[in-house]
Amino acid sequence: MKTSTARALQCSAALTAAGLLLTACGSSGGSGSAQAATTSFKGRGPITYVAGKDTTGTVQTIINRWNKLHPKEKVTFIQLPTDADSQRQQMIQNAETKSDAYTVLATDVVWTSEFAAHQWIDPLPANQFPLDKMLKPVVQTGQYRGKFYAVPASSNGGLLFYRSDLLKKAGITRPPTTWAQMTADCAKVKKLPEAKGMSCYAGQFQKYEGLTVNFSEAVNSAGGQVTDANGKPDVDTPQAKKGLDFLVDSFKDGTIPKEAITYQEEDGRQAFQSGKLVFLNNWPYVYSLAQKSGIAGKFAVAPLPGLNGPGTSSLGGSNLALSHFAKNKATALDFMKFFTDEESASYFLKNASLAPPYASLYDNAALDKRYPYLPDLKASITHAVPRPRVVQYGDVTSAIQQEAYAALTGKKSSAQALKDLQADLRKLTAQ
């Protein structure tokens, strides 16, 4: 759930952690005239909850709790593949066939615009959810053109996981705040006998949504941007080149191991837990799993580093949306309230290290003591930059992945990749 995991994400510009609200543009199949902003929440009975594979083992617990309380309105958990691109594709296929097999959808925050614009999901009654208690950037991911389409279940901000035990043995007293410091710290750590065979750093670099996330973070952390506030491409710049160059040069000099070109979130987590990496860029869900591994007590968490100081995360997370073609929508609405309330968010934080949407859970002294990364996570989320907010998100993220991957694998220079990406994004956002 680097929800954190990540993926594809528009009647205009809104696709990065969940989207923006709309009165509706397009018919069920795609384009068309505006539709009424009303949803009839009628019908009670069994429904389905559709999400990526639960690697945390916590989702079914919440569903079981609901099913015990509502034996005539049971929820069946349909698990999709772990990667966001496949999840998005299957949800779209279900919508295009107007199937009622999927009821409540766990969507990436950047899919809101696309799903709402195509009328694959219904507007939700915003006044029935405690949105005023949630972090503002998280709530905005569920909006599209003045309407509310997706309620936050969890948020996500990138964090730097690092081997605190090895940094300490190397005489390093604090985690790095810049890429140069991280590289220098790694060089010192690798001189230790305990660090024999370790690599320095990894994120997610396989050609999927995780690459869009990591590319965007590098560009933003170097002072650049993929698109401006109006959704216009702005990636062919010196700042963006510095960000992409960091990744390209890190692969060339071995700072990032060659095998990381195949990494998704789970690959990086497992490499870090098995002692193959000194530093890892990943979502907070890694924390609870690493605490149960062989490196428990040997790692810590810090903000992502950047070119000249702390870096900038891409905004991630998971929202719940209601399929336009679903049955039993009254049950679905009640389940969405249940699944996204503060009690459930607290459970997911404590048992899966999922970033809660509720501000109060970050400002709780007892929780901060138990989860020392929470202040850094809150800062990561509140300062995060959304991935491009565009209706054509699927095409946009594919273009980003294509050009970034070409640069990382040496098929294009950073300059050429960014020039080509700028041209591709211009065409896509002009549609």
Image (spheres, rainbow, N blue to C red):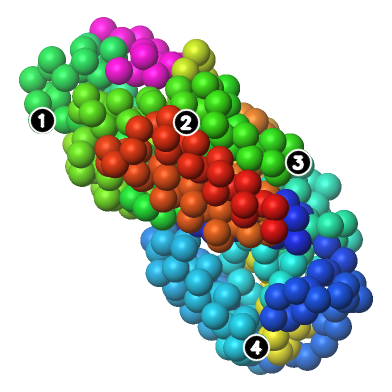
Where 157 falls versus 219 (above or below)? below
Q: What element carries label 2?
A: helix
Give, as a three-letter code, the residue at label 4: Lys
CA gap between label 3 and label 1 equals 46 Å
Measuring from the top left, give residue 183's x and y in whole percent: 30, 18
Residue receiving disc 4: 98
Residue receiving disc 3: 230
Single out the mark in the foreground, 1 or 2: 2
Where 39 falls versus 429 (above or below)? below
CA gap between label 3 and label 4 equals 32 Å
Give, as a three-letter code, the residue at label 3: Asn
CA gap between label 1 and label 2 equals 26 Å
Range covered by the magenta-colored residues: 171-183
Where 160 falls versus 173 (above or below)? below
Residue receiving disc 2: 218
Give, as a three-letter code, the residue at label 2: Ala
Q: What element carries label 1?
A: loop
